[in-house]
Image (cartoon, helix red, strand yellow):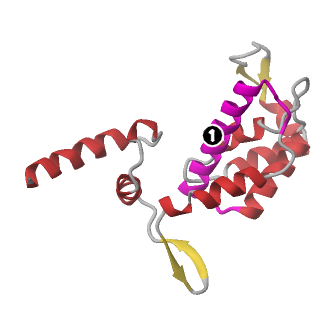
Amino acid sequence: MKLGRCPICHSDLHLDALIEDAAGREVLAMLLKFTHSCARPLVAYLGLFRPAKSNLSNSRTAKLMREVLDQFKPSRHLAHALSETVRQIQKKRAGSGDVKPLSNHNYLKTVYDSTSNLFLYSEAGGEVAPVKESDEVYFEQMYRAGADFSKIQVAGAQEWLANRRRKNDGQN
């Protein structure tokens, strides 16, 4: 079944060809496990592992996705860390011209750990768990951390900031 054309290379995209491949099926199934808007930054992150003159195989992509799922729980924190990792690596590559593919997830781990203070966590039964996963709480956390709202790619962020500013202006 032809889905359409690739917006980059204009080749045909066939869903049945992807589903016929076991690793392709696994990749599609795992993408659904990445909640909290993690799927899009994950796909960009996986692109950092692609060699300059070839593509990632479905089996390599599935392996990388399993590794990310094994090490991190899908959350806004992970989505942020994935996006920041991609942004920083692309900036570094643009400056140096070096496009050597990533070989492990150490850079992501570093970014994830360094941004943990932006996300509220509490101890619950010996495990670290998010306090609440709502846009309102997330926006409040980012606001208090001094985040640049123009870079937050979550629907409703700008509206929340405008409401917050109106509320603050009304109190002063």
Q: Is 26 drawn above or below residue 119 in the view shown?
A: above
Name the kind of residue labelled 1 in the image.
Arg
Magenta residues, as a range?
A: 72-101
Q: Is residue 143 left or right of residue 90?
A: left
User: How many numbered discs sit on the rendered protein?
Assistant: 1
Q: Main secondary structure of the magenta part?
A: helix
- When asked about the image quadrant of residue 67, the answer is bottom right
Task: Give SS at disc 1.
Answer: helix
Q: Which residue is mark 1?
A: 40
Horizontal and vertical percent position of residue 123 = 53, 81
Horizontal and vertical percent position of residue 132 = 44, 67
**Location of the N terminus (image quadrant):** top right
How crowded pointer 1 is (Cα within 10 Å; few <14, some 14-19, many 20+) is rated as few
Q: Nearer the viewer, residue 10 or 85?
A: 85
Q: Is residue 95 left or right of residue 11?
A: left
| Residue 33 in sight | no
